[in-house]
Image (cartoon, rainbow, N blue to C red):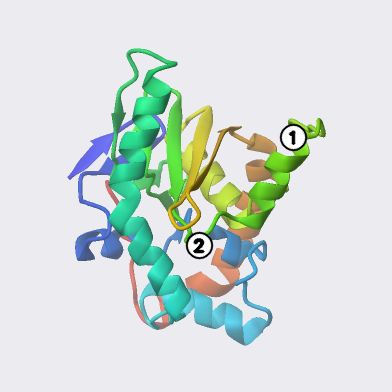
Amino acid sequence: MWDERDTCWVSNIEQGTEEWKKLRLCSISSSNISECVGRSSFSPKNHDEKIELAKIICGISQKSFSEEAISNMKRGTLFESNVREYHFNKIRSKEYNLNMKELGLAVWKNDQRFRGSVDAEIGEDGIAEYKVPKYMYKKLIQYVEANEKGYKCENDMSHIFNSHLDQMTQNSIILNKKWCDYQVVSFEDKLEFYQRIPTNYDLWNDTLYPLACEYYTNYIDPIINEYHLKLVSPN
């Protein structure tokens, strides 16, 4: 069930299945870390909301989604394989002999409370994250337009949503990767955006990891103890 690597264990269970969902319970996944540390527009605003998020993470409560969010998730599931094939063909024309594959849930050896699932693993050094919005994100359009006018700042990542950047960062840390390809394809307006994002170790070490640990201790641990839950361990 588990493939052991230097920095993590990787499950062979397919993403999105009920078994995969169970492996994520009681953990801070790459897709919810932004909410936990207050860097997402969906982050809880008060103590009660933080408790509710912890209950959702532990499977005690169910998260509600808007019709738009449900539509976005369905679109992503439906077109992800197409985007993966498109992305692979694009990078293969530039970087030969790269293997690319889907992965199950990865559990970080340094701290098993942190887990993540990537859309693709690319060779030894990289991973990929795919987003399939109905329309291209405005911040990305503005970023491209600014670059075309000559306004460039290589280290500025403000055009990427924190939730996306944090997701890519956590996955890169867990799998010990140097970069993550950020591929966004909007089918309604037929636009695409691509950028290779270097792993931001300072963001992880100075912000994401310590804040997430604090949230886990203050909110998730009490829920685990109250409901007698257990974090599934690969070992």
Q: Give the amino acid at mark 1.
A: Asn
Q: Residue furthest left?
A: 1
Tell me which residue sits at (21%, 51%) in the image.
14
Q: Residue 12: horizontal and vertical position, in percent?
A: 20, 44
Tell me which residue sits at (38%, 65%) in the image.
73
Tell me which residue sits at (40%, 83%) in the image.
61
Q: Is residue 207 above or below residue 48?
A: above
Q: Residue 210: horizontal and vertical position, in percent?
A: 65, 53
Q: Residue 145: horizontal and vertical position, in percent?
A: 73, 41
Q: Give the amino acid at mark 2.
A: Asn
* Residue carrying label 2: 32
How far apart are the alpha carbons under marks 2 and 1? 30 Å
Looking at the image, which is closer to me, 84 or 176? 84
**Can you tell which quarter of the image residue 51 is in?**
bottom right
For marks 2 and 1, the one nearer the N-term is 2
Q: Residue 180: horizontal and vertical position, in percent?
A: 51, 35
Q: Which of the image's four quarters has the N terminus?
A: top left
Looking at the image, which is closer to me, 159 or 14? 159
Residue 203 can be seen, yes or no: yes
Name the mark nearer the viewer: 2 or 1.
1
Tell me which residue sits at (41%, 26%) in the image.
90
Q: How many C-alpha atoms fall within 10 Å of the one at disc 2: few (<14), some, or many (≥20)?
A: some
State the SS at label 2.
Answer: loop
Q: In this view, does 169 lie above or below 96?
A: below
Looking at the image, which is closer to me, 16 or 160? 160
Name the side, left or right, on which 33 lies relative to 87: right
**Can you tell which quarter of the image residue 87 is in?**
top left
Q: Which residue lies furthest to the bottom in this view?
A: 48
Q: Is residue 33 above or below residue 56?
A: above
> Residue 147 shows which numbered tag?
1
